[in-house]
Image (cartoon, rainbow, N blue to C red):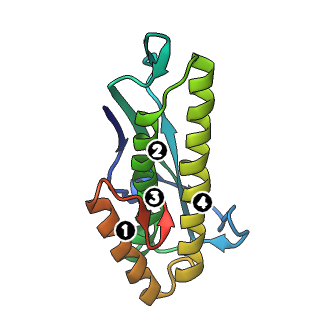
Amino acid sequence: MAITVSASPTALSWTNFTVSPSKILDPADGTLVDAYTSFGYTFPNSAPASTDGVFRFPDVYTITIKPKASVWSGISQTAALLSHEQWHYDVATITGRALCRELARLRADSLSELRTKMDEAIELHFHTRAGILQKRYDIDTRHGTNGHYQKIWKDRMTKTLADPKADTMGGFWL
């Protein structure tokens, strides 16, 4: 089955950010930050397939990821800050891959049951697990100001992005 996730754009640029006149409140920990990146996602309108009364997702199904990003107007838009924000955005791709694998396995006796299972899978991967990764990353890197941990997490992300079958990153489930 070819259920996939596609980030658009793949790499962030400062043009993907909304400029904010003040520092931005990070909803995960309540701190004021210079930039904040999360993601949104859309699913295709194609109807689930039904074979002999068993519902599943179609063979071709792509989840699209889009950035939701803001940057404070009073901060320099540096490569280091953009790299930190790119990591936050890349979480959508790696957790999205795990979500796609789960959706490919889902089967249900009704369309509403399939939808419930899909909603539970989205909550698990895009909200719970992505949220845990985001929070741990910001704690360890002190929102990008600790270069040592920034490099450790960046290396983990590079390795995980290179392995489309990865189920974990740094000991955290995707």
Q: Which residue is mark 4?
A: 131
Under mark 4, the amino acid is Gly
Say above or below: 35 vs 114: below
Dot 3 or dot 2: first in sequence order is 3
Whether residue 73 is visible, yes or no, is no
Image location of residue 82, percent across then percent down? 41, 68
Number of other residues with Cα within 10 Å of mark 1, as a class: few under 14, some 14 to 19, many 20 or more: some
> Which one is earlier in the sequence, the residue at label 1 or at label 3?
3
Q: Marks 3 and 4, Cα distance to the nearest angstrom?
A: 9 Å
Q: Nearer the viewer, mark 3 or mark 2?
A: 2
Q: Judge the density around disc 2: few (<14), some (14-19), many (≥20) Cα neighbours within 10 Å.
A: many
Image marks 4 and 1: residues in contact by CB distance under 8 Å = no
**In 3D space, how far apart are the residues under numbered discs 1 and 2 (Cα atoms)?**
17 Å
**Number of the front mark, 1 or 2:** 2
User: Quick one: 128 or 17, which is closer to the camera?
Assistant: 128
- Res. 99 mark: 2
Residue found at x 68% / y 64%: 28
Q: Which residue is mark 3?
A: 91
Residue to which mark 1 is pinned: 157
Residue at the farthest left position: 162
Where residue 165 sits, quadrant-wise, is: bottom left
Q: Quadrant of the N terminus?
A: top left
Q: Residue at x 65, y 68 (%)?
A: 23
Nearest the eye: 102 or 32: 102
Residue at left offset 38%, top offset 22%: 58
In this rendering, position of residue 13 left or right of residue 120:
left
- N-terminal label among 1 and 2: 2
- Is 9 in front, or is 130? 130
Residue 75 is marked as none
Earlier in the chain: of badge 3 and badge 4, it is: 3
Q: CA distance from mark 2 to mark 4?
A: 14 Å
